[in-house]
Amino acid sequence: MIDRLKLYGEQLRPLLGAGESPLVAVTCQVAFGADRLERSPEEVEHLLRFLPATVRDQVLAALRDGQPRDDRDRWRRAMDRAVDILIGADSLITADPDEIIGGVAAAGHVGSYAHRLSAALSGKIGYAVVTDRRLLLASQTPRGEFEELESVPRQAVLSARRAGRIFQRGRVLLDFVDLSQIALMTGILFTGPAERLVSALTTGVVRDAG
Protein backbone atom coordinates (compact mmCIF):
# COMPACT_ATOMS: atom_id res chain seq x y z
CA MET A 1 0.00 0.00 0.00
CA ILE A 2 1.34 3.42 -0.92
CA ASP A 3 1.96 5.74 2.01
CA ARG A 4 0.98 9.12 0.53
CA LEU A 5 2.45 11.02 3.44
CA LYS A 6 5.89 9.49 2.90
CA LEU A 7 5.57 9.95 -0.84
CA TYR A 8 4.46 13.60 -0.75
CA GLY A 9 5.59 14.75 2.67
CA GLU A 10 7.90 17.49 1.37
CA GLN A 11 5.34 18.79 -1.13
CA LEU A 12 2.65 18.93 1.57
CA ARG A 13 4.84 20.76 4.09
CA PRO A 14 4.10 24.28 2.72
CA LEU A 15 0.42 23.75 3.61
CA LEU A 16 1.22 23.26 7.29
CA GLY A 17 1.45 25.91 9.97
CA ALA A 18 4.40 26.44 12.26
CA GLY A 19 4.81 23.41 14.49
CA GLU A 20 1.96 21.53 12.79
CA SER A 21 2.62 17.79 12.38
CA PRO A 22 0.99 15.66 9.66
CA LEU A 23 -0.28 12.22 10.66
CA VAL A 24 -1.69 10.71 7.49
CA ALA A 25 -2.54 11.55 3.88
CA VAL A 26 -4.94 9.56 1.72
CA THR A 27 -6.62 10.17 -1.62
CA CYS A 28 -10.34 10.78 -1.35
CA GLN A 29 -13.47 12.09 -2.97
CA VAL A 30 -17.04 12.64 -1.80
CA ALA A 31 -18.60 9.19 -1.64
CA PHE A 32 -21.37 8.13 -3.97
CA GLY A 33 -24.78 8.59 -2.35
CA ALA A 34 -27.65 10.94 -1.65
CA ASP A 35 -26.94 14.66 -1.33
CA ARG A 36 -28.80 16.06 1.67
CA LEU A 37 -27.00 19.40 1.81
CA GLU A 38 -29.01 22.59 2.11
CA ARG A 39 -28.52 24.84 -0.91
CA SER A 40 -27.43 28.45 -0.65
CA PRO A 41 -29.38 31.06 -2.67
CA GLU A 42 -26.43 31.29 -5.08
CA GLU A 43 -26.45 27.52 -5.66
CA VAL A 44 -30.21 27.51 -6.19
CA GLU A 45 -29.98 30.35 -8.70
CA HIS A 46 -27.37 28.34 -10.61
CA LEU A 47 -29.61 25.25 -10.59
CA LEU A 48 -32.63 27.22 -11.80
CA ARG A 49 -30.80 27.94 -15.05
CA PHE A 50 -31.17 24.27 -16.03
CA LEU A 51 -34.91 23.96 -15.37
CA PRO A 52 -37.43 24.07 -18.24
CA ALA A 53 -38.81 27.58 -18.68
CA THR A 54 -42.31 26.66 -17.48
CA VAL A 55 -40.93 25.05 -14.31
CA ARG A 56 -38.54 27.94 -13.72
CA ASP A 57 -41.40 30.45 -13.94
CA GLN A 58 -43.41 28.56 -11.33
CA VAL A 59 -40.42 28.30 -8.99
CA LEU A 60 -39.76 32.02 -9.29
CA ALA A 61 -43.43 32.67 -8.57
CA ALA A 62 -43.10 30.60 -5.40
CA LEU A 63 -40.16 32.76 -4.40
CA ARG A 64 -42.19 35.94 -4.79
CA ASP A 65 -45.29 34.58 -3.07
CA GLY A 66 -45.97 35.56 0.55
CA GLN A 67 -43.64 36.75 3.29
CA PRO A 68 -41.62 33.82 4.68
CA ARG A 69 -39.51 34.27 7.79
CA ASP A 70 -36.18 34.52 6.01
CA ASP A 71 -34.38 33.90 2.71
CA ARG A 72 -33.67 30.27 3.55
CA ASP A 73 -37.39 29.62 3.95
CA ARG A 74 -38.01 31.27 0.58
CA TRP A 75 -35.46 29.12 -1.23
CA ARG A 76 -36.55 25.94 0.55
CA ARG A 77 -40.17 26.55 -0.44
CA ALA A 78 -39.14 27.30 -4.02
CA MET A 79 -37.16 24.08 -4.34
CA ASP A 80 -40.00 22.09 -2.77
CA ARG A 81 -42.22 23.57 -5.48
CA ALA A 82 -39.73 22.52 -8.16
CA VAL A 83 -39.67 18.96 -6.87
CA ASP A 84 -43.48 18.83 -6.79
CA ILE A 85 -43.60 19.97 -10.42
CA LEU A 86 -40.84 17.70 -11.69
CA ILE A 87 -41.82 14.43 -10.02
CA GLY A 88 -45.39 15.21 -8.95
CA ALA A 89 -46.89 15.13 -5.48
CA ASP A 90 -48.34 11.67 -6.26
CA SER A 91 -45.17 10.31 -7.79
CA LEU A 92 -44.38 6.64 -7.34
CA ILE A 93 -40.84 7.71 -6.43
CA THR A 94 -40.93 7.28 -2.66
CA ALA A 95 -37.29 6.51 -1.98
CA ASP A 96 -33.98 7.85 -3.15
CA PRO A 97 -32.09 5.06 -4.98
CA ASP A 98 -28.80 6.86 -4.32
CA GLU A 99 -29.44 6.69 -0.59
CA ILE A 100 -30.44 3.02 -0.74
CA ILE A 101 -27.33 2.02 -2.68
CA GLY A 102 -24.72 4.46 -1.45
CA GLY A 103 -26.14 5.95 1.74
CA VAL A 104 -26.03 9.67 2.43
CA ALA A 105 -22.98 11.34 0.87
CA ALA A 106 -23.36 14.65 2.69
CA ALA A 107 -25.90 16.41 4.90
CA GLY A 108 -25.88 19.76 6.63
CA HIS A 109 -26.83 23.40 6.51
CA VAL A 110 -25.20 26.07 4.36
CA GLY A 111 -21.79 26.91 5.84
CA SER A 112 -21.59 23.71 7.91
CA TYR A 113 -18.38 21.73 8.04
CA ALA A 114 -19.79 19.06 5.72
CA HIS A 115 -21.07 21.70 3.30
CA ARG A 116 -17.63 23.34 3.16
CA LEU A 117 -15.77 20.07 2.59
CA SER A 118 -18.25 18.81 0.01
CA ALA A 119 -18.05 22.07 -1.93
CA ALA A 120 -14.24 21.96 -1.85
CA LEU A 121 -14.16 18.40 -3.23
CA SER A 122 -17.00 18.82 -5.73
CA GLY A 123 -16.07 16.89 -8.87
CA LYS A 124 -12.51 16.34 -7.64
CA ILE A 125 -10.29 13.58 -6.35
CA GLY A 126 -8.18 15.17 -3.65
CA TYR A 127 -6.14 14.34 -0.58
CA ALA A 128 -7.38 14.18 2.99
CA VAL A 129 -4.51 15.14 5.28
CA VAL A 130 -4.90 14.76 9.03
CA THR A 131 -2.54 16.74 11.22
CA ASP A 132 -2.37 17.23 14.97
CA ARG A 133 -4.56 20.32 14.45
CA ARG A 134 -6.70 19.95 11.34
CA LEU A 135 -8.43 17.84 8.75
CA LEU A 136 -7.10 19.37 5.55
CA LEU A 137 -8.27 18.79 1.98
CA ALA A 138 -5.74 19.42 -0.76
CA SER A 139 -5.41 18.99 -4.51
CA GLN A 140 -2.30 18.32 -6.56
CA THR A 141 -1.46 20.61 -9.46
CA PRO A 142 -0.05 19.29 -12.76
CA ARG A 143 3.34 20.54 -11.57
CA GLY A 144 3.15 18.27 -8.54
CA GLU A 145 2.55 21.03 -6.02
CA PHE A 146 -0.28 20.92 -3.49
CA GLU A 147 -2.97 23.52 -2.91
CA GLU A 148 -5.26 23.70 0.09
CA LEU A 149 -8.94 23.32 -0.78
CA GLU A 150 -10.43 23.56 2.71
CA SER A 151 -9.65 22.65 6.30
CA VAL A 152 -11.50 22.22 9.58
CA PRO A 153 -10.19 21.88 13.15
CA ARG A 154 -9.63 18.35 14.43
CA GLN A 155 -11.93 19.21 17.33
CA ALA A 156 -14.77 19.78 14.84
CA VAL A 157 -14.83 16.04 14.00
CA LEU A 158 -17.28 14.47 16.42
CA SER A 159 -16.77 10.93 15.13
CA ALA A 160 -15.14 9.05 12.27
CA ARG A 161 -15.80 5.48 11.28
CA ARG A 162 -15.48 3.20 8.30
CA ALA A 163 -18.88 2.53 6.77
CA GLY A 164 -18.29 0.50 3.62
CA ARG A 165 -20.85 0.14 0.86
CA ILE A 166 -20.90 -1.78 -2.39
CA PHE A 167 -17.88 -0.72 -4.49
CA GLN A 168 -16.98 1.67 -1.68
CA ARG A 169 -15.25 -0.49 0.90
CA GLY A 170 -13.01 2.44 1.76
CA ARG A 171 -15.94 4.71 2.68
CA VAL A 172 -15.42 6.83 5.81
CA LEU A 173 -18.31 8.57 7.54
CA LEU A 174 -17.48 11.79 9.38
CA ASP A 175 -19.86 13.47 11.84
CA PHE A 176 -19.17 17.04 12.93
CA VAL A 177 -20.00 19.00 16.04
CA ASP A 178 -22.47 21.16 14.07
CA LEU A 179 -24.42 17.93 13.33
CA SER A 180 -23.48 17.90 9.65
CA GLN A 181 -22.11 14.74 8.03
CA ILE A 182 -20.01 13.75 5.03
CA ALA A 183 -18.89 10.42 3.60
CA LEU A 184 -15.46 10.28 1.98
CA MET A 185 -14.49 7.46 -0.36
CA THR A 186 -10.83 6.48 -0.01
CA GLY A 187 -10.94 3.26 -2.02
CA ILE A 188 -13.23 0.99 -4.01
CA LEU A 189 -11.92 -2.36 -2.80
CA PHE A 190 -9.24 -1.70 -0.19
CA THR A 191 -9.87 -0.50 3.37
CA GLY A 192 -6.34 0.34 4.51
CA PRO A 193 -6.47 4.09 3.71
CA ALA A 194 -9.91 4.35 5.34
CA GLU A 195 -8.71 2.67 8.51
CA ARG A 196 -5.66 4.93 8.66
CA LEU A 197 -7.81 8.03 8.20
CA VAL A 198 -10.21 6.93 10.95
CA SER A 199 -7.36 6.06 13.29
CA ALA A 200 -5.66 9.43 12.78
CA LEU A 201 -8.90 11.34 13.41
CA THR A 202 -10.06 9.36 16.43
CA THR A 203 -6.86 8.44 18.26
CA GLY A 204 -4.08 10.53 16.71
CA VAL A 205 -2.20 7.27 16.10
CA VAL A 206 -1.79 5.85 12.59
CA ARG A 207 -1.48 2.16 11.94
CA ASP A 208 1.27 0.91 9.63
CA ALA A 209 0.60 1.15 5.91
CA GLY A 210 1.19 -2.52 5.31
Image: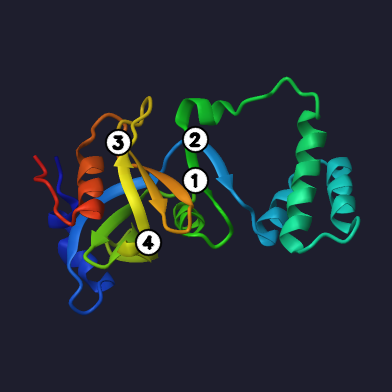
Residue at 80% from the left image edge and 24% from the top image edge: 90
Label 2 Cα neighbours within 10 Å, binned few <14 / some 14-19 / many ≥20: some
Horizontal and vertical percent position of residue 153? 34, 66
Indicate which disc, 4 or 3, sits on the residue closer to the N terminus: 4
Query: Label 4 sits on what residue type?
Result: Ala
Query: Label 2 sits on what residue type?
Result: Gly
Indicate which disc, 1 or 2, sits on the residue closer to the N terminus: 2
Marks 4 and 3, how far apart at CA: 22 Å
Q: Is residue 53 left or right of residue 173?
A: right
Label 3 Cα neighbours within 10 Å, binned few <14 / some 14-19 / many ≥20: many
- Residue 170 is tagged as 3
Horizontal and vertical percent position of residue 111? 54, 63
The residue beneath circle 1 is: 106
Marks 1 and 2, how far apart at CA: 8 Å
Query: Label 1 sits on what residue type?
Result: Ala
The residue beneath circle 4 is: 156
Q: Secondary structure at mark 3?
A: loop
Q: Are marks 1 and 2 in contact (CB under 8 Å)?
A: yes
> Which is more foreground, mark 4 or mark 3?
4
The residue beneath circle 2 is: 33
Q: Residue furthest top?
A: 92
Q: Secondary structure at mark 4?
A: helix
Quarter holding the N terminus?
A: top left
Marks 2 and 4, how far apart at CA: 23 Å
Q: Are marks 3 and 2 in contact (CB under 8 Å)?
A: no
Q: Secondary structure at mark 1?
A: strand
Q: Is residue 141 visible?
A: no
